[in-house]
Image (tube, rainbow, N blue to C red):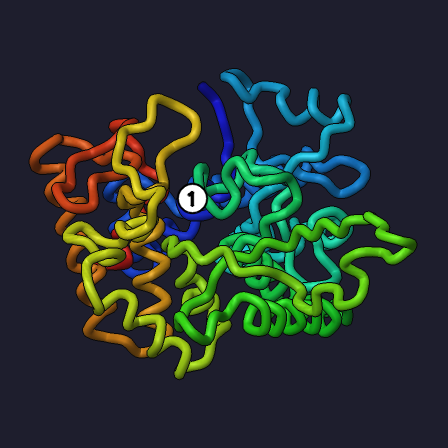
Amino acid sequence: MNELWGWDSYWVAHSLRYMFGRFGDSFMEKHGIERGDALLHMKGSVLDFLDSQSADGFIPSMLAEDGIFKDFFAGELKKRHKHNQHAPFLCQSALGAAQFADDYSWLNEEKLITYLEYYKNNQYDVKSGLFFWQNDIMIGIDNNPTVFCRPPRSSADIFLNCFIYLEYVALAKILAAKGDGRSDNIMSQAERLKRAINDEMWDERDGIYYSQDISFSISDFLACGVKLHSGMPPHWNSMPLKIRIWACFLPMYAGICSAERADRMCAHLMSDDAILAKCGIRTLASNEKMYCLENSKGNPSNWLGPVWTVANYCVYKGLKNYGKTELCEEVARRTVELMCNSLEKYGDLFESYNPDSGKPYMHPGFLSFNMLVSEMM
């Protein structure tokens, strides 16, 4: 099955760049990966997605030659169904490839600008200043309960908003490197989104960031000529979806939150084992009612508690960003131990794992996110 997934290809390229930087070209070539081949993957993944862009700027989340998603997005576009576009990793992928090559000339920045404009025109809530998912198809965290099976266009997801912020930052860097004066405007949009995430998504009582419900339904009922609910309409822009998923910690990964808020967020990792388990970060806190460690039979993959290396990595990196050395090293240690155990006991790496026992779930030979362990070793 020949498929190219946006955020998988981003993390593979991210890991390759780190490994070349840490171990050097000769070490990598000795182990079968030449710099030219790595660069071909990085640039090719970006160019494949840019080549698939529609006139309105839409880029699909994945590309497929065969399999269940073959022609899925093309067919849906013909039906005029609006789906989520490419997960917010394309500008970051493009920046990483350009930096690795020390060459920006191959990049069409207009396509990247149009791609982010599509998000702004189709998946942006003006009232809250946050971005939302069109539906629960291709959202990265497949069955994230703050999006999964919820009403369309209602979920301003913390994962989506943090990585769109990083997309704006990456695009601004690309434009600056190419001497394009629009970089300042793009960076100002990043700052606006950063403020919206801090204003709307931070929960002062709980000391953590939450995804938000941005759907509002205003009735038009009249009683003796009086329009009900009109005397004091809602003054809030969004309502918190108080569910602790691993992505609640992404403002630390993205460098969005203050040091004081980072301290409060760390308390969620240290208070009990609801989030930090023996094998790393539970993708959903164990004291949430949706918590479930069953092995998925197919689509969606299960993110309701099982450990995924990408979640471990993002929390690890966020802790490192804010100088939380002891906790950062503990997450790294548990992740490395999990990967070593997987290889020694099962002879392979897998898509996800039981957070307490390390028992693997689905897809032996799964590389992708697992490559991130190289940075935690």
Quadrant where the C terminus sits is bottom left
| Residue at the front extreme of this rendering | 224
Which residue is rendered at x = 50% and y = 17% of the image? 67
* Image x and y of residue 137, in percent: 56, 34
Q: In the picture, residue 127 is in which quadrant?
A: bottom right
Answer above or below: position of 376 versus 299: below
* Image x and y of residue 75, in percent: 70, 20
Q: In the picture, residue 194 is in which quadrant?
A: bottom right
Number of marks drawn? 1
Answer above or below: position of 227 versus 206: above
* Image x and y of residue 213, in percent: 59, 54
Q: Which of 377 and 32 is in front in this view?
A: 377
Label 1 sits on residue = 38
Q: What element carries label 1?
A: helix
Which residue is rendered at x = 60% and y = 42% of the image? 86
Along the horizontal axis of the image, is 366 left or right of 148?
left
Answer above or below: position of 147 versus 198: above
Along the horizontal axis of the image, is 213 left or right of 228?
left
Amino acid type of disc 1? Ala
* Image x and y of residue 118, in percent: 74, 48
Which residue is rendered at x = 30% and y = 47% of the image? 309
Is any part of residue 26 visible from this angle? no
Answer above or below: position of 340 versus 168: above
Is any part of residue 254 visible from this angle? yes
Quadrant where the N terminus sits is top left
Which residue is rendered at x = 38% and y = 53% of the image? 245
| Residue at the right extreme of this rendering | 225
Q: Nearer the viewer, residue 325 or 239?
A: 239
Q: Which of 306 and 185 is in front in this view?
A: 306
Q: Which of 190 and 298 is in front in this view?
A: 298
Q: In the picture, residue 59 is in which quadrant?
A: top right
